[in-house]
Image: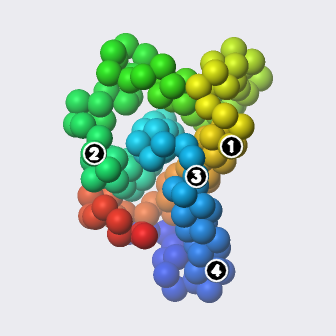
Amino acid sequence: MDARLNYLSSPIAGKAAKQFMAVGRTLKGSALPALTQELVALRVSQINGCAICIDMHTKEAGAAGETSVRLNLVAAWREATVFTEAERAALELAEEGTRVADAAGGVSDEVWAHAAKHYDDEQLTTLVILVSFMNSVNRLNIITRQPCAGDYEPGMFG
């Protein structure tokens, strides 16, 4: 499969990519635990079917010390016993925030309250921006059929 657009040859894509990467770096430097961020990024990417991001976040999580058991169970986190209550709250918020069209009202008050029990305002802010960010990146990759899934190396994009 060939990409529909070559982001590397487009001046506007180059400028936008720098801004996207800056957002990603800002989120990585937040107080939301790094492994929680990777689990959320992975789950959003699974829902959206973004192979590049699934590849990236699986490998980044592994490089950060995540176990293969937990990575293999992210898609079925509700039935899995290996996630903390805080991680479960983050994954639930990520799912409702990604499936906005399916969940007519967006993120429910119950899901928000559950997440707020485990995360402070800064961490919740990071979580909300991360879910939105991942949905944007997933869509950019899917719409243009970016074909590099499988080639990602941890740390490749800084």
**First along the sequence among labels 3 and 4:** 4
Secondary element at tag 2: loop
Q: How far apart are marks 3 and 4 (CA)?
A: 24 Å
**Which residue is tagged 2?**
65
**First along the sequence among labels 2 and 4:** 4
**First along the sequence among labels 1 and 3:** 3
**First along the sequence among labels 2 and 1:** 2
The amino acid type of the residue labelled 4 equals Lys
**Which residue is tagged 3?**
30
Q: In which quarter of the image is the N terminus?
A: bottom left
Tell which of 112 and 142 is nearer to you: 112
Q: Distance between the residues labelled 1 and 3?
A: 8 Å
Q: Residue at x 62, y 31 (%)?
A: 119
Mark number displayed over residue 83: none
Q: Distance between the residues labelled 1 and 4?
A: 28 Å
**Which residue is tagged 1?**
122
**Which residue is tagged 4?**
15
Q: Residue at x 64, y 71 (%)?
A: 19
- Residue 81 against residue 6 in the figure, above or below: above
Secondary element at tag 3: loop
Q: Distance between the residues labelled 3 and 2?
A: 18 Å
